[in-house]
Amino acid sequence: MKHALEAALVEGSSAVLGALPRRAALAAGAVLGDITRRLGLRARVARDNLRHAFPALAPAARDAILAAHYRELGRIVAEYTRLPELVLAAAGDVLADARGLEHLERARADGRGAILLSGHFGNIELLGAWLGRRHPVAFVVKPLSNPRVDAWITRQRGRAGVETIPAGAGLRRVYQALRANRWVAMLGDQDARRAGVFVPFLGRPASTAIGPARIALATGAPIVMGFDLRRPDGRHEIDVDPPLVVLDPAAPDAAERLTALHVAALERRVREQPELWFWLHRRWKTRPPAGGARVSPDAGPGAAVAGSVAAAARAGHGTH
């Protein structure tokens, strides 16, 4: 019954928002976000996250960030209902600018594929789908617990021209996609529980999946960070950063250092536009064990603090 109600809500909202003109749908989405905030959905988690990330800000300033964030979530929901339409829109209608595409073009020319990494920042689905128009992209996704909603989302991605690979069980397909010189899109900012490596993120150690870094080092495919930004007029900008590079990629702690680098790249974006990051997630739910590893993004080879998490990762027990 719960799954049926959730699916009906998703499908009904999609039908209503999808029938509106795009600008009206964005405005309706922002209102929906405001209503969600007033209902208090995940608000306690979000406020606690903001308080730890920006302790110097006044509570009113943090509340303003949170209000803007809920409105942006509503806009993203409104856009998701018409994702295929947005991806195929005429130049300038939806996407105002795209910077750094030469980094992905260089990766394509090298022939080893690329790991297109981002976080829950802006409209990540639109980011991946739009880049997929230039070169085949496969999303690594975790299936939802509600199969009907999951099927609806998968159809939306498919209509936008994006392939999906299930997380975990699809590891072989990730390697196949990279060997075929495709771009594999992943998210690197979810709590990885005890399977992760602890790296700094917004002032606290955060358990982070080490899988993307390990795959990059094993295959030679670069990790390229991509970000979607919202303009005041509602259109989008895409920023693609240069590939992340670690000194001595053969060092035992190279995967940990590469993980710290991509988390630091996301942190810079979050500090610049905090309203675009997903504050409702319990990102720091897993606490580091006493003496656990905390890897600095600017650490050289061998600089990771010795500890149980790093030892497990090097032994092969930290794969995500």
Image (spheres, rainbow, N blue to C red):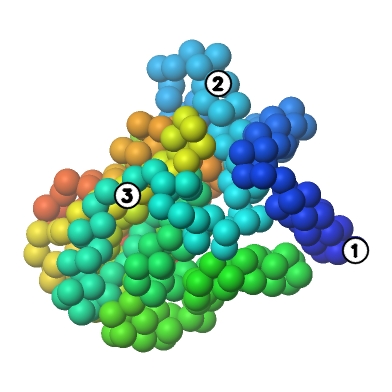
Residue at left offset 28%, top offset 70%: 114
**Residue at label 2?**
64
- Badge 2 crowding class, 10 Å Cα cut-off, few under 14, some 14 to 19, many 20 or more, is few
Q: Position of residue 14 (x, y in %)?
A: 74, 54
Task: Out of 254 and 154, give the one closest to the viewer.
Answer: 154
Write down the residue under mark 3.
98
Q: Is residue 88 found left or right of 110 in the rendered image?
A: right
Residue farthest to the right, as pictured: 1
Whichever of labels 3 and 2 marks the residue nearer the N terminus, that label is 2
Residue 87 is labelled as none
Q: Is mark 3 on a helix, strand or loop?
A: strand
- Gap between marks 3 and 1, in whole Å? 43 Å
Question: Do tag 2 and tag 1 residues touch (Cβ < 8 Å)?
Answer: no
Q: Nearer the viewer, mark 2 or mark 1?
A: 2
Q: Label 2, label 1: how many angstroms apart (C-alpha)?
A: 36 Å
| Amino acid type for the residue under numbered disc 2 | Ala
Number of numbered callouts drawn: 3
Query: For the point 48% across and 81% down, which residue is it?
Result: 170
Q: Is residue 318 left or right of residue 283?
A: left
Residue nearest the viewer, comparing 285 with 173 = 173
Residue contact at pointers 3 and 1, CB within 8 angstroms: no
Q: Read off the residue under disc 1.
A: 1
Tag 3: residue type? Answer: Ala
SS class, disc 1: loop
Among the two numbered marks 3 and 1 on one chain, the one whose residue lies closer to the N terminus:
1
- The residue closer to the viewer here, 68 or 24, is 24
Q: Looking at the picture, how far across and down is residue 10, in whole percent?
A: 76, 56
Mark 2 element type: helix
**Image position, residue 143 (x, y; %):** 62, 70
Q: Is residue 6 left or right of residue 308?
A: right
Vertical placement of 312 versus 306: above or below?
below
Q: In this view, does 153 lie above or below 94?
A: below
